[in-house]
Image: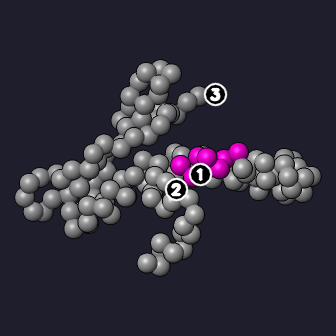
Amino acid sequence: MKKPPTYGDWRESALCRSTADWPFDWVAEITTFDPAARSHAFVATIRQSGVRRFDEALANVRAMARATAMLGLLVSVAHVLDMSDPEHPAFADSAADCLDELLRHEAPLRALLADFALGTNVPVLAHAQS
């Protein structure tokens, strides 16, 4: 299997101002680290308008750095949907098998939610409305 150039966990650098004077931008970099190969790779520079509040700009950077983790969870959930579709070759004739597969991804999902400070029992809709 060929690995993409940004294989490994994505990490964000500290969010900082591009200049000391107005107008400035919030700037951060996303890099990746592959512990097996002990290699770092540059992924992207994120530049946001300085009119954004610091906490909002920081949340945006964190979300972008978690893109690979979010994509992995979406792929896993799509697989569970395939398991519950009688027309799909991966069909599992047991709701318990589907639930087991979904629960296998509970820890990464909760860790991702904790990264965004949503907590474990707080509904997302409550945050969107407040």
Q: How dense is the environment of label 2, judged by Cα within 10 Å: few (below 14), some, or many (20 and up)?
A: some
Q: Kindly identify the residue that appears in the image at 15 percent across and 59 percent down.
A: 24
| Mark 2 secondary-structure assignment | helix
Q: Which residue is mark 3?
A: 1
User: Considering depth in this image, is 17 or 99 the residue closer to the camera?
Assistant: 99
User: Residue 41: x percent and y percent?
Assistant: 38, 31
Q: Position of residue 30 (x, y in %)?
A: 36, 42
Q: Callout 1 environment at 10 Å: few (<14), some (14 to 19), or many (20+)?
A: some
Residue 64 in the image: state x and y as whole percent.
Answer: 42, 52
Q: Quadrant of the C terminus?
A: bottom left
Which label belongs to residue 113? 2
Residue range corresponding to the magenta coloring:
104-111
Q: Is residue 91 magenta?
A: no
For marks 3 and 2, give the CA distance: 30 Å
Specify which label sits upstream in the sequence, 3 or 1: 3
Q: Residue furthest bottom?
A: 129
Q: Which residue is pictured at 36% across the width and 53% down the height?
A: 61
Location of residue 82 with respect to 31 vertically, above or below: below
Which residue is label 1 attached to? Answer: 109
109 magenta-colored? yes
Left of 47 or right of it: where is 24?
left
Would you say the residues marked 3 and 1 are in contact, meaning their CB atoms lie under 8 Å apart? Answer: no
Q: Please tell me whether the stretch drawn in magenta is mainly helix, strand or loop.
A: helix
